[in-house]
Image: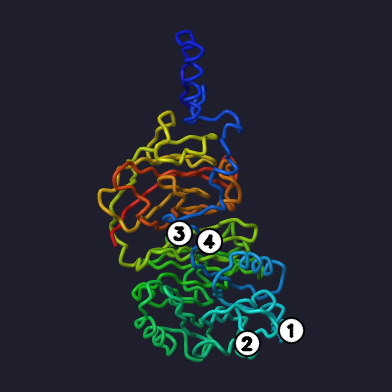
Amino acid sequence: MRRIRQHAPTLGSVTMSVLLLSLRRQGVSSAGPCLQHEDEVESSAAGYPSTSRRENGGEKEHSLPKFAVIGDFGTGNSASWEVAKMVHSWDPEYVVTTGDNWYHSPDWNTLHDRLCSPWHEWMVEEQCSGYSHRTGTQPLFMPAMGNHDWYSPEPYFHTFQSLPRNGRYYDVRKSPVHFFVLNSDESEYDGTWVGSKQHNWFIEAVASSDEPYKIVVFHHPALCTVRERINYNMQWPFHELGITAVLNGHMHGYERLLKNGTYYMVNGAGGCCPKGFDGYDVDIRSQVIHGYEKAGYNVHGAQKVLIHSRLIEFQFWSINECLIDSVSIPLLHHALFGEGTPLIATDTKVRYLDCTVPISWTSVDFDDTLWNLSVNNLRGEHGRKVRIAFAPSMKRFSYLRLRIRRIHGLSVWINNLPVWQLNVAPGDLHDHPYACTDHVSDWVETWLDGDVLSTNGTNVLSMQVHNRYDGAYGTLEIELEGYPH
């Protein structure tokens, strides 16, 4: 680490005091750029970013429309109740499920225990009598059918008889989102294969939609890292139809994949038996963007989905308040895939440091000249802080595509604005919280609002590394590209 040489004999005591005070204000002690004591982190508890503060393009989370996604939750066990408690704390406008809404041949009593007691707020009087309910355009509880729901179809259809169409597959507009809830079970009367009655209805429904976000929901995964669990019948031409995301369940865990520009998210972590991806032959590695097929197979949690002005953000939270995953997807994102304008590339120089620094280290004008200098390919050690300065954006980009290689967890700022965080345990970031899991994907990526860039001054991307434990590291590399709409 570079250290400042002290030439005490040539400086008076007053001059030395002024110099040291100036350096400390910049995050440089007399021994180097690191703060030497925790009390040097000015008002850290109040001023330093924490894992509970997240923004994208300057929008505060509490002011954004949001909905929740749960899957494989209908057990009535303690984990399913913890998931429900967490979702209630988010106050979503509506709830979408990926199936298996109840288990074990339910009767009317178990219906109330497993559905009405935890989820009555988003259901209607005909479904759960004697409970309080939200007002709003129905439905506010949109379930997909799972294989366990088919085991006792009579109470299921009775409960959800107010769903559109036949209740087995249907569509709902919640502008700017259009949901297409399908039935992937082989018992579906109208078929699940390409060319079936259900498929043909879906093609026509998507073609008539003018909503910018089109989300497909069904139970059995069309794509996951376990080959033997894939429902190949449901591999419909989602990319060609401009589908934003496909949400599935059935696997009792969570992972996210990307194929042909369409995001596939497996969310079956709502409470049932934590077996997930364990014990299977994990495959399709080249299609995995962020997955937890090993480290996170027993994670219980749910997705919080935030609707920004020009992005939709999918977060997956575990019941111990850990943000496992987060990805933002632009409006009409299929039109963006292609070659963007490189802003940060492999030959970009980066500054890095592995110690406690002032809370201002993510700001544009922070002085990092005493930080270590490296190429954009370095070790991703826990707690490492990275700063990359790049030229102003001479043309306006609607979106940015950020890709980061091979670490456990991360927190990212652009021009002092927090823009992305995933796999980080709760806590103030100056305490260097660890990652929630130790799974490492080759690359992780997200999209950002292009308005975070400055067009008349230097831009700075700042990043903090979160690993699962000390001593873990991988190759850290950062790419940022700009895309016009």
**Quick one: label 2 or label 1, which is nearer the N terminus?**
1
Quickly name the residue at label 1.
Answer: 109
Which amino acid type is shown beneath numbered disc 3?
Ile
Which tag is nearer the camera, tag 1 or tag 4? 4
Which amino acid type is shown beneath numbered disc 4?
His
Q: Is residue 321 above or below residue 76?
A: above
Q: Position of residue 176 (x, y in %)?
A: 42, 73
Q: Which residue occupies the foreground of this view, 323 or 449?
A: 449
**Are the residues tagged 3 and 2 within 8 Å (C-beta)?**
no
**Are the residues tagged 1 and 3 within 8 Å (C-beta)?**
no
The residue at 59%/59% (across/down) is 296
Is disc 4 placed on a helix, strand or loop?
A: helix
Q: Is residue 279 left or right of residue 231?
A: right
Quickly name the residue at label 2.
Answer: 159
Which tag is nearer the camera, tag 3 or tag 2? 2
**Quick one: label 4 or label 3, which is nearer the N terminus?**
4
Q: Which mark is residue 93?
A: none
Quickly name the residue at label 3.
Answer: 289
> What is the CA distance from the residue labelled 1 to the residue labelled 4?
36 Å
Which amino acid type is shown beneath numbered disc 1?
Asn
Q: Position of residue 78 (x, y in %)?
A: 72, 67
Q: Which residue occupies the foreground of this view, 406 or 315?
A: 315
